[in-house]
Amino acid sequence: MKIKDMEIFLDLLNTQSPTLTANNFSTTQPNISIIIKNLEQQLGEILFERLGKKLLPTPKALSLAQIWSDLVKTYYASLENLNNETLLGEIKIAATQSIAEYFIADILFDFKLHFPKTKIYFQTCNTKECFEFLKKGLVEFCIVESEIEPIILHNEQIKSKLWHQDELIIVSNDKALSQKAVYIDELLNYKWILREQGSGLRTRFLDEINKAGITLPIFLELDRMNAIKELVLNKNALSVLPKKAVGKELYNKTLYAIKLKNIDLKRNFYTLKRKGYDFNPLLDKFEKFLFLAKDNFK
């Protein structure tokens, strides 16, 4: 019996879908079915029963889960040398645009310095896309800007952790607007440029002003923060952006922060991964590294 077969069994236990597990292991659905059938023949027991499109584990499968999970962890632990340079493997990560551009790049660079023989596949997408990629097994780990509803996390067997708190600000190239705090409804006549639908930044901002009974007239939607920032710099327009994204412009006084009354624009970042997906030692290392690194943010 191969360690890889045990890993496939454990993943199938979580996904309950041969197609998703096939994606996770870069193989085909028929190959997954053959591996499970071989395991059942070796054990003389049925491990999964089909219910619609899902595979439900039998009592025998559930009893094997902890035993095989421990075996897989022990196997990888035995391969890991105390010297970080010998740690091998790969991880697939996705993060939202704000996090990718202003938080994660330095962390990925430092992680590679510590573990030079590892491979990191990284992609940028909005919160909704990150969640879909994780569900489909296209990535193993996500960092997003919006909290996912607990019932959705439960139904999809996804685990979420609070990672970091960030601050959004309203920005303009008009210094006069920064001289005193205003109510959001005093800014409705300006041209507002926001991120696209599905963006965690957009969702957080609109949810907050909707609590005040305000519907924002959106003039333009763009999916790149740098493009939005350039328009606000050069046009008579407003936008909401991460404070970290406009730090240089605020310092140089080419953009100004507009203070809002009775509106809280702090937001949380969250990590996401599939429940029970704890047999990739490199991903465990990265997750610990990520949470330590946030303590260095200014």
Image (cartoon, rainbow, N blue to C red):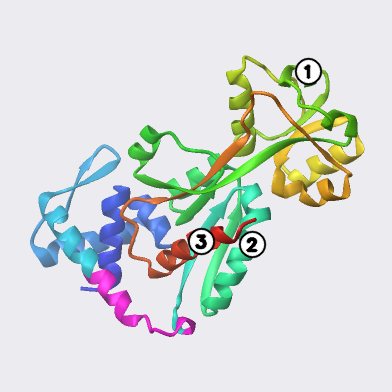
Pointer 3 or 2: first along the chain: 2
Helix, strand or loop at disc 3? helix
Q: Which residue is mark 1?
A: 186
- Name which of mark 1 and mark 2 comes first in the sequence: 2
Residue 30 within the magenta-colored segment of the rendering: no
Q: Amino acid at mark 1?
A: Glu
Residue 267 x/y as whole percent: 57, 39
Q: Whole-percent x and y of residue 159? A: 38, 47
Magenta span: 71-85
Judged by depth in the image, the label closer to the viewer, 1 or 3, is 1
Q: Residue at x 85, y 29 (%)?
A: 177
Q: Earlier in the sequence, mark 1 or mark 3?
A: 1
Disc 2: which residue? 105
Residue at 38 percent of width and 57 percent of height? 22
Residue plotted at (80% across, 27% down): 180
Task: Check disc 2: other Cα within 10 Å, few if <14, some if 14-19, many if 20+.
Answer: few
Q: Which residue is the site of mark 3?
A: 290
